[in-house]
Image: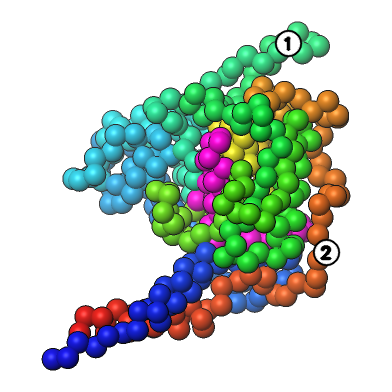
Amino acid sequence: MKRFQFPLHLFAIALCLSSLSQTSARFFPNISSIPPYLVPNATIPGAWDAFKHFGNCHAGEKVDGLSKLKKYFNRFGYIPNLPTTNLTDDFDGDLEAALKTYQKNFNLNVTGELDGPTLEHLVKPRCGNADIVNGTTTMNSGKPASYNSTKFHSVSHYSFFPGTPVWPQNRRDLTYAFLPENELSDEVKTVFVGAFQRWSAATPLTFKETTSFYSADIKIGFFVGDHGDGEPFDGVLGTLAHAFSPPSGRFHLDGDENWVITGDISKSSVESAVDLESVAVHEIGHLLGLGHSSVEDAIMYPTISSRTKKVELASDDVLGIQTLYGANPNYDGTTTSAPSTQARDTSAAGDHLGSTPTPRLWALRVVLAVGSLLLLF
């Protein structure tokens, strides 16, 4: 049989276009621009909603699916040495210890059981960065901060990455760039301008966009699923984003989320709506060297519910970042984002800016599938 030669240049083009589709994302100018088909009658299931079925489970029991919960705790550092084979659904000592540490970190009653408040917290969307690194948790360490005017000892809960990495002294004016394949609109990019300003208001750091992605200090991109950094995204309302410690500068967001750009997101009827600036401010904290905090009002708290906007740095965030870099001499105690001198000209937004073009995606999958089959002959 004569072997059919699928044109390699066409195959390469298909692969390239497929890669572009995998780095697309959904953006909405505001909640009113979200199309009706994303407003279901039922709640959109989150990545970890199955955990809700483990109510009041405790040590010594065996429940179908507990192995997935163990993988969750492994991912965020609570069970560091999880076996890759023969993982059971037993509620064993490792799971109980992980639960107790998790409950302490998130200011829950330390019961070691899967009680209601713990399960409610476990299913929330969150940052993909681990709470415990190299077996050490600092979220709830209670580091002394200072004495206030009433002489009560205040406590801080900010944390740093192991080794306390920071941007070098000679790199205080940082550049950032967006993955070109994402083709982000000016409206989306302006959200990041405001998010960076919140950190520069409290520190001597400055941030400026550059068009050179590969030479930028901070590289921002939206990705779907496994994107090559060992931290795959998991779909709607799972891990929203993650960022690496200085001076890596890698900042990745999940393209599967329904990102809202402006407005009061709490009034959204879309269960899966996520405020873009809230997530961006949190991840920038990681880019600068902050770990997670156990203070619920802090930007560096690991979880954030959908339809929630939280963008103002709390005192715990400010204490942490100023410990690393010092204070901005003009800092007035607030990080409210002022109108930016870097603000862009904006145009009228469509119903869903930057959304993934579904017909093209399906066409590309067909081309790739046919091409792969033909190469076998």
Q: Amino acid at mark 2?
A: Asp
Residue 370 within the segment the image draws in magenta: no
Task: Report which quarter residue 149 is drawn in.
Answer: top right
Residue at image position (75%, 72%) is 349
Span of residues in magenta: 239-267
Which residue lies most toward the bottom here? 1
Which one is nearer the viewer's eye here, 102 or 120? 102
Which one is nearer the viewer's eye here, 235 or 264? 235
Residue for badge 1: 147
Which residue lies most toward the left here? 1
User: The C terminus appears in which quarter of the rendering?
Assistant: bottom left
Residue at image position (45%, 83%) is 363
Which one is nearer the viewer's eye here, 108 or 265? 265
Q: How is the image coloured?
A: rainbow
Q: Are marks 2 and 1 in contact (CB under 8 Å)?
A: no
Q: Amino acid at mark 1?
A: Tyr
Residue 224 located left or right of residue 273: left
Q: CA distance from mark 2 to mark 1?
A: 47 Å
Residue at image position (48%, 34%) is 131
Using a 10 Å C-alpha cutoff, classify the residue at mark 2 as few (fewer than 14 neighbours), some (14 to 19) or many (20 or more): few
Residue 261 within the segment the image draws in magenta: yes
Q: Nearer the viewer, mark 2 or mark 1?
A: 2
Residue 178 drawn at (x, y percent): 62, 56
